[in-house]
Image (cartoon, helix red, strand yellow):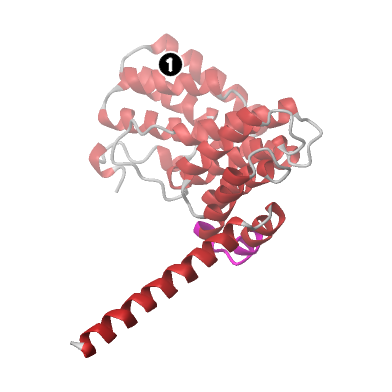
Amino acid sequence: MRYSLTLIVLFMLTACSSMLASKSDADKKNKETAEELYAKASSQMNDATYADAIKSFETLQSRFPYGRFAQQAQMEIAYAYYKQDEPESALTAVNDFIKQYPKSPSVDYVYYLKGLINFNENQGLFGENYQPNVADLNPKAPRESFDAFKDLVTRFPNSKYAPDAKLRMQYLVNALARHEVKIASYYFRRGAYVAAAARANGVLTEFPQAPATRDALKIMVDSYDAMGMKDLRDDTQRVLDKNVTKDGIKPSAELFPDKTKSWWLFWK
């Protein structure tokens, strides 16, 4: 009995000691200043331990919501989610920042980050080896990326991020146009000539300066020819010839393989 009582007492003392130690650690954490929390979170960012950094920044925000570090913490949270490849969480953090701090001197960077998040999300859609199994893929993220970069260069034309944003916008325009042309070509190979011509015409309307307009015009010429619409075919061919003469940019041969090849082999 005396031995059992001794074990019970030792267990209770150990438990009390652990509780006191835990309470002491919690007290220390609760006594951390905003500067200390920010320094810890920044160190975690530098170490690329983004999940820990997010927790630290969120703790900072909850304890010091009106302090001078809260705004920076929100921006860092967005960037940490971006680095963790969590675009939805990153975009939520970015949009929260824009809503809460629209006049922040760093808001131009946040618009730029918003563009980057969407820019990177669907790069596979526009890669050189892009070969869709269906024609109606939705390039939502690239379009939203373009809109974010457009907001940046429109609102903050003198921002240091504006030049890169303009380059990315140009890339996105060309990529979106190329994407639409590939869909139009897909429809053409299936014999859906009306859909092919309509999709190609949309490229001319939405992306008139993109090099892919030559491909769009060629698809329209071939579609009208397949439908026996000779006047439209000839008119479109004249427009295509005029554009080729002007700048030398010709339609891409790979979009127009041997017509004897089955449409379902086109994406192989």
Task: Determine the residue positioned at 68% across, 52% down.
Answer: 34
Magenta span contains residue 48:
yes
**Mark 1 surroundings: few (<14), some (14-19) or many (≥20) residues within 10 A:** many
Type of amino acid at the residue the image marks with label 1: Arg
Front residue of 59/9: it is 9
Residue highlighted by disc 1: 233
Q: Is residue 50 visible?
A: yes
Task: Determine the residue positioned at 57% across, 55% down.
Answer: 56
Task: Determine the residue positioned at 52% across, 31% down.
Answer: 143
Span of residues in magenta: 42-51
Q: Is residue 211 visible?
A: no
Magenta span contains residue 245:
no
Q: Residue 90, position in %: x, y?
A: 52, 43
Q: Residue 243, position in %: x, y?
A: 61, 25
Q: Residue 58, position in %: x, y?
A: 55, 48
- Residue 155 lies in quadrant: top right
